[in-house]
Image (cartoon, rainbow, N blue to C red):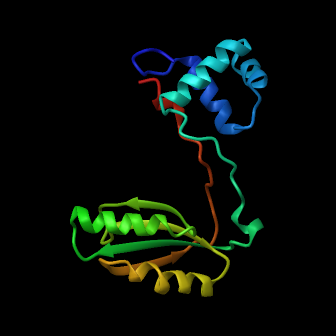
Amino acid sequence: MQSNNTLDRYDIKILHELQQDGALSNQDLAERVGLTAAPCSRRVKQLEESGVIAARVVRIDERKVNLSVIVLLNISMDKHTPERFETFEQAIADIPEVMECYVITGNTADYQLKIAVPDLESYYDILLGKITRIEGVSGVHSSFVLRKVVDTTAVPLEYAKR
């Protein structure tokens, strides 16, 4: 990786290959990107240390582990204060069914959550038993995912060269 934190063509190739298969051995990765093993390993380490590679994880198909209901939940808060948002964010981070949480704008909601549960009864229990009990939650709106059209964690790397 270049010193000014821009990515060169090898960094981009490495990131592309790892996004396709994060379990590649260093030797296989090096061959795919046109480097020898040692420089490839150094580059991957630099990408990790700089935070460009945030984590390497295993993606699990929710349906194969009995999480067939995916909910997009918009949440409105009663007050827009740092303390209120901090309280909410700490509480929501402790709910394992919450897979993603975003602060959003341009909508009537303040947060959007992605929640995975096995059935509607489980969702009902989480919504009314946990989420609506968090101090400051003033409104909720649930949408249920019928089908995934695009499902990727890969980021578009063509912008990384700028």
- Residue 106 drawn at (x, y percent): 29, 62
The residue drawn where x is 32% and y is 63% is 86
How many marks the image carries: the answer is: 0
- Residue 76 drawn at (x, y percent): 32, 74
- Residue 79 drawn at (x, y percent): 22, 73
Q: In terms of depth relative to the viewer, which is nearer, 158 or 49?
A: 49
The residue drawn where x is 44% and y is 78% is 131
Q: Is 47 drawn above or below residue 139 in the view shown? A: above
Q: Is 74 drawn above or below residue 39 in the view shown? A: below
Q: In terms of depth relative to the viewer, which is nearer, 149 or 161?
A: 161
Please give left or right for residue 32 compared with residue 76 in the image.
Answer: right
Q: In terms of depth relative to the viewer, which is nearer, 161 or 37?
A: 37
Q: Is 35 drawn above or below residue 88 in the view shown? A: above
The residue drawn where x is 58% and y is 41% is 55
- Find residue 38 and report its image quarter: top right
- Find residue 112 and report its image quarter: bottom left
Please identify the quadrant where the C terminus is shown. top left
Please give left or right for residue 49 compared with residue 83 in the image.
Answer: right
- Residue 25 drawn at (x, y percent): 77, 29
- Find residue 88 and report its image quarter: bottom left
The residue drawn where x is 69% and y is 49% is 58
Please give left or right for residue 124 compared with residue 88 in the image.
Answer: right
